[in-house]
């Protein structure tokens, strides 16, 4: 299907944070030292607790690797962890989203991603908005994601890659989404992803950058930017807290290209603003 040029704004509000100055052009920004070392240690201990919690084994919100029993993601982490719930409400976090989106915001999705050494599976190239529009009914790309690193992000341990400027191009994915596909896609993305021709065209046009930096740094990125990560075959694990903020003026409707809504732990329908 042909690519579509974005009609919606990228920045809806007023940027006050110097680190967000290029967000409109690039579609992403790196925030150095969002968390201090003692906070990184505390949140790392908290996500280790969640991964080893026997009460979460069998809970739909806990996702394991397709090829092993290792934890891949834990969803709705801001509700499962009081510490993460408090972090979401801190101005240093939520104000980043408010500046870009120009309104109050709510949590569309939250999770912890674990990419263990010697076996963590990456995330194939994709635009979040394509999925959120088709499968969740998000009307426009007025949403941002904040990935907060709890481990050092190197160029070789599966750190996130982005295509700067690609947020201005919408890439529709062909085919209908099978019912109940969402569970499998959370383990390994194989359906509803761009074609190799799509990726080649975008990479030739926009290039590829990589988010690297110490634990405590963060990446804020537009919902429509093309991004992905590779498998981690190094001994160095990579984990992050992942928060998705959507504008309260952009609430979900019915899915545009899926037979049913996905569960609310993947796509929240509680549009209460973060306070």
Image (cartoon, rainbow, N blue to C red):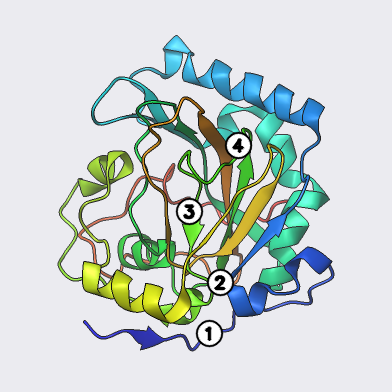
Task: Kindly check if marks 4 and 2 are in contact, taking CB atoms under 8 A apart as contact.
Answer: no
Foreground disc of the pair 4, 3: 4
Name the residue rendered at 23%, 74% in the picture: 197
Foreground disc of the pair 1, 3: 1
Which residue is tagged 3?
269
Q: Quadrant of residue 29?
A: bottom right
Which residue is tagged 4?
78
Within-10-Å neighbours for mark 1: few <14, some 14–19, many 20+: few
Foreground disc of the pair 2, 3: 2
Mark 4 vs mark 1, CA separation in Å: 29 Å
> Which of marks 2 and 1 precedes in the sequence?
1
Relative to the observer, which residue lies in front, 264 or 215? 215
Question: Is 174 placed above or below 245 here?
Answer: below
Q: Position of residue 174 (x, y in %)?
A: 18, 71
Question: Is 208 placed above or below 239 here?
Answer: below
Which residue is tagged 1?
8
> Which of marks 3 and 4 precedes in the sequence?
4
Task: Kindly check if marks 1 and 2 are in contact, taking CB atoms under 8 A apart as contact.
Answer: yes
Q: Position of residue 32 (x, y in %)?
A: 76, 50
> Which of marks 2 and 4 precedes in the sequence?
4
Left or right of 8, for residue 200:
left
């Amino acid at each position: 299907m042909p690519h579509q040029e974005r009609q919606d704004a990228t920045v809806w509000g007023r940027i006050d944070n110097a680190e967000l100055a290029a967000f409109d052009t690039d579609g992403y920004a790196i925030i150095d030292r969002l968390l201090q070392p003692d906070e990184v240690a505390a949140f790392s201990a908290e996500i280790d607790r969640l991964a080893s919690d026997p009460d979460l084994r069998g809970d739909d919100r806990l996702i394991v690797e397709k090829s092993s029993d290792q934890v891949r993601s834990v969803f709705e982490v801001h509700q499962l962890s009081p510490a993460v719930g408090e972090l979401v409400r801190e101005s240093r976090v939520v104000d980043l989203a408010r500046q870009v989106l120009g309104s109050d915001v709510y949590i569309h999705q939250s999770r912890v991603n674990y990419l263990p050494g010697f076996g963590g599976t990456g995330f194939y190239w994709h635009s979040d908005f394509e999925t959120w529009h088709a499968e969740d009914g998000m009307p426009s790309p007025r949403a941002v994601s904040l990935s907060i690193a709890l481990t050092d992000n190197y160029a070789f341990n599966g750190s996130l890659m982005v295509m700067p400027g690609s947020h201005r191009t919408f890439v529709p994915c062909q085919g209908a989404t099978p019912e109940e596909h969402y569970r499998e896609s959370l383990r390994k993305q194989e359906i509803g992803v761009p074609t190799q021709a799509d990726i080649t065209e975008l990479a030739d046009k926009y290039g590829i950058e990589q988010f690297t930096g110490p634990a405590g740094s963060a990446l804020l990125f537009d919902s429509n930017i093309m991004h992905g990560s590779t498998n981690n075959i190094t001994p160095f694990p990579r984990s992050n807290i992942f928060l998705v903020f959507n504008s309260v003026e952009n609430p979900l409707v019915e899915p545009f290209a899926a037979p049913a809504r996905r569960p609310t732990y993947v796509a929240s329908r509680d549009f209460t603003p973060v306070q």
